[in-house]
Image: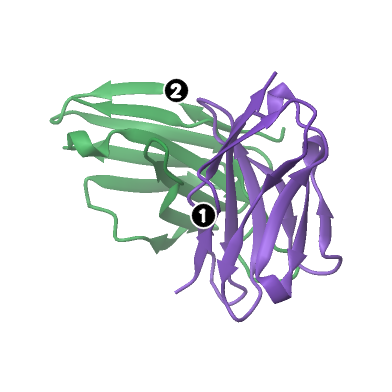
Chain colours: A purple, B green
Amino acid sequence: AQSVTQLGSHVSVSEGALVLLRCNYSSSVPPYLFWYVQYPNQGLQLLLKYTTGATLVKGINGFEAEFKKSETSFHLTKPSAHMSDAAEYFCAVKMKTSYDKVIFGPGTSLSVIP
Amino acid sequence: DTEVTQTPKHLVMGMTNKKSLKCEQHMGHRAMYWYKQKAKKPPELMFVYSYEKLSINESVPSRFSPECPNSSLLNLHLHALQPEDSALYLCASSQALGTGPGNYGYTFGSGTRLTVV
């Protein structure tokens, strides 16, 4: 069965430091890949997605992610963390053969230290 | 209008009550979803509607009853809930179902925080 893992349930970075949130999927066929962010008491917001084409995807708020098929990974990065980036981040996948079921990873809580 | 609006934001209900959650979008999206999210957990899919027809029911108990009266509106009717049903209920929409290259991300509402007492 398809699964998504996010290494580190909690990540802390200093303000201005690099943000790296890890996501790996288990599938022999590359799925569609998404990153969502959830701020406290809010719904989820789509940060970026990879469907086809260029493997480096740019999203909102300065985030980007790179699809690496050989590593079955889709890690999320941001060069310089801001206090407002503190939130829960979910990686999600959808199989290309799936009618429409998105599978979410367990989430990573990002803290930004002043 | 690029929002999904959910009402109410908070709901407290007894185990014998009947209540409804409402979700509305005016983006012309033809797929709508209900998710349940427990604290510190990812969202879990409950129902998927496509063109106002129920497409997926993830074996959700019958005390949850979805309804899609039109392309902009999605309801979730609640009856005889249990305390373990307390959670954040999220509505989402996307342009359409499908597996094509233009695969769509979801637009989520802010959710209804439900407490069953």
Please identify the residue farthest to the right as the structure is shown. Answer: A54
Q: Position of residue B3 (x, y in %)?
A: 65, 33
Which quadrant is the C terminus of chain A positioned in?
top right
Q: Nearer the viewer, residue A86 or B112?
A: A86
Please tell me which residue is depicted at 75% across the width and 70% down the height of the picture. Answer: B101
Please tell me which residue is depicted at 50% across the width and 25% down the height of the picture. Answer: A41
Can you tell which of label 2 and label 1 is closer to the viewer? 1
Q: Chain of mark 2?
A: B
Please tell me which residue is depicted at 44% across the width and 33% down the height of the picture. Answer: B22
- Determine whether A93 is above or below A113 in the image: below
Query: For this view, does A40 lie left or right of residue B40?
Result: right
* Residue position marked by numbered label 2 in the rendering: B9
Q: Chain of mark 1?
A: A
Please identify the residue farthest to the bottom as the structure is shown. Answer: A28
Label ID, residue A104: 1
Q: Residue A36 occupies which quadrant of the picture?
A: top right
- Determine whether B14 is above or below B83 in the image: above
Label ID, residue A81: none
Q: Mark 2 belongs to which amino acid? A: Lys
Q: Nearer the viewer, residue B48 or A35?
A: A35
Please tell me which residue is depicted at 39% across the width and 27% down the height of the picture. Answer: B113
Q: Mark 1 belongs to which amino acid? A: Phe
Q: Secondary structure at mark 1?
A: strand
